Amino acid sequence: MSDTGTTLDITGWTCPAPLRDRPRVVMGHGGGGALSAELVQHLFAPAFGGDVLAQLGDSAAVTLGGVRLAFSTDSYVVRPLFFPGGGIGDLAVNGTVNDLAMSGASAAYLSCGFILEEGVEMSVVARVAETMGAAARAAGVEIATGDTKVVEAGRGDGVYINTAGIGIVPDGVDLRPQRVVPGDVVIVSGEIGLHGVAIMSVREGLEFGVDVQSDCAALGGLVRSMLAVTPDLHVLRDPTRGGLAASLNEIAAASGTGVVIHERSVPVPASVANACAILGLDPLYVANEGKLVAFVPREHADAVLDAMRAHPLGRGAVVIGEAVDAHPGLVVARTALGGTRVVDLPVGEQLPRIC
């Protein structure tokens, strides 16, 4: 419904903007939005091929020797290296653990690649390594192999990290957006936007009247609590780059369903809302590093929600919407005033270099 009470038919809406034709890479190609999707779908995927890559999930589910594995890799180029609530070391561990968890797998082993800039202080490298080790132990995962490279001074930002991880997917678990059906309930595990705002606060020296801490955390235990209720969860995503909006759009597009969220139900803390108002940002597009969004069959939703709220990382879990037959592939938000708006996939990124 619009603010005037008129029903809006958005199924035939199209974007008048022309296709993006960029001869050079821009920052938005790494932002998790439409430019990132175009880079993967039109350049990398055709070059690499393969049915597994075509899944384009947070991690790939593969079968090897009769065992179903989740396999994921990610790179971390965050600036600054340390921020309220975490740093690049625990971010690198938790990010890959979480990607595996979104396939239902408990991370078993990680690899770690360090790219160091000539001149970076050894004390900084040691601090990063120590936080990585502590995060791995806390997540119950072992860093089993790694590599180190050094680039010339001025060719990096001190420390870049790549991690890859593997874990076993339990029997009966099949988490992918293609399983989403109309009627599924959309649950988010807690307050959104904290990581992106925490990074901005220290990077730009901004004061928002309250200390904003990143939500960086490993979500494997929370996912196991949810799967203990039922293995029949349909899809999980951790809304990092591009925020909650990007994750919902990816799921809607892959599943061919519409998604409706209720803006009043989305848990945006006052600190994030105030910061976004100052910076001209939409909290739905701000990155998170310790939250997940789940599409759950309606008959299991109450029990899954209770299990999430019983876990320390899911105490703030709430239902924010549902999958619907209408407007397939589109995400729509119902506003507090009774209107609706389309929540589109971001083109680039609002906050550069946040993971």
Image (spheres, rainbow, N blue to C red):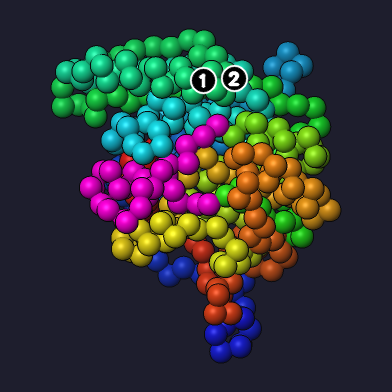
- Residue type at numbered disc 2: Gly
Q: Is residue 46 above or below residue 192?
A: above
Residue at the front extreme of this rendering? 210
Badge 1 crowding class, 10 Å Cα cut-off, few under 14, some 14 to 19, many 20 or more, is many
User: Which residue ends up furthest to the right in the rendered image?
Assistant: 299
Q: Residues within 10 Å of mark 2 (few under 14, many from 20)?
A: some
Residue 25 position in % (x across, y down)? 30, 42
Mark 2 residue element: loop
At horizontal 29% and vertical 24% (from top left) the residue drawn is 159
Residue 313 % position (x, y): 59, 40
State the residue in front, 213 or 341: 213
Residue to which mark 1 is pinned: 136
Residue type of the residue flagged with mark 1: Ala
Quadrant where the N terminus sits is bottom right
- Between residue 191 and residue 26, name the one nearer to us: 191
Q: Secondary structure at mark 1?
A: helix
Residue 212 covered by magenta stretch: yes
Q: Quadrant of residue 274?
A: bottom left
Q: Residue at x 63, y 44 (%)?
A: 314
In the depicted view, which residue is nearer to us: 339 or 189?
189
Q: Do we see residue 318 in this rendering? A: yes
**Image: magenta residue range:** 191-218
> Which residue is disc 2 drawn over?
140
Check residue 106 in the rendering and tell me which mark sits there, or answer none: none
Q: Say whether residue 166 is visible.
A: no
To which quarter of the image does residue 87 belong?
top left
Q: Position of residue 227 (x, y in %)?
A: 75, 36
